[in-house]
Amino acid sequence: MRVLPAGSGADAAALPLVHSALPASDVVSGAPMAAAETLAEIADVEVGVWEMTPGTATDTEADEVFVVLSGRARIAFLDPALPAIEVGPGSVVRLAEGMRTEWTVTETLRKIYVA
């Protein structure tokens, strides 16, 4: 975890991240890897950078709003069943705790999240 001191900044698009394989039980296809870095914790809110490499994986979401910095993906909402969305640079998405999603990343996706 890298927490930014007050009065400092970081280039979220260029921040080096250490990737790890996703749990095999979450991988639907490919060999996606993910990485995350916490940038700030304010009260009960966490702000950070998250990235996933190409492939398809499922997830159970936390309460979160995120902004895509780079890459492309399709997010299918499995539970509750909602229309899938396509995301890319500039997309802003709201997720709710407990949602079951399936992420199909076609270009390594990097986002800033607030959870």
Image (cartoon, grey):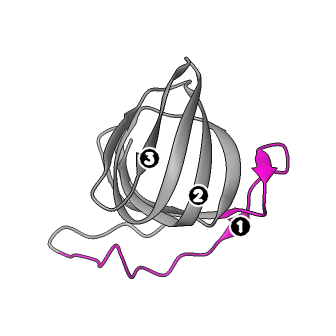
Q: Is 98 positioned to the left or the right of 47 in the image?
A: right
Identify the mark at residue 29; answer none if there is no mark: none
Q: Amino acid at mark 2?
A: Val
Circle 3 Cα neighbour tier, 10 Å, few/some/many (<14 / 14–19 / ≥20): few
Q: CA distance from mark 2 to mark 1?
A: 16 Å
Query: Is residue 85 depicted above or below 10 in this figure?
Result: above
**Is label 3 in a helix, a strand or a loop?**
strand
Q: Is 25 positioned to the left or the right of 47 in the image?
A: right
Identify the mark at residue 20; answer none if there is no mark: 1
Residue 21 seen from this side? yes
For residue 18, what is the image quadrant? Answer: bottom right
Region in magenta: 8-33
Residue 1 spot, x, y in % from top left: 49, 66
Q: CA distance from mark 3 to mark 2?
A: 10 Å
Q: Is 107 positioned to the left or the right of 115 in the image?
A: right
Q: Amino acid at mark 3?
A: Glu
Residue 92 spot, x, y in % from top left: 29, 46
Identify the mark at residue 105; answer none if there is no mark: 2
Q: Which is nearer the N-term, disc 3 or disc 2?
A: 3
**Is label 2 in a helix, a strand or a loop?**
strand
Q: Mark 3 highlights which residue?
A: 86
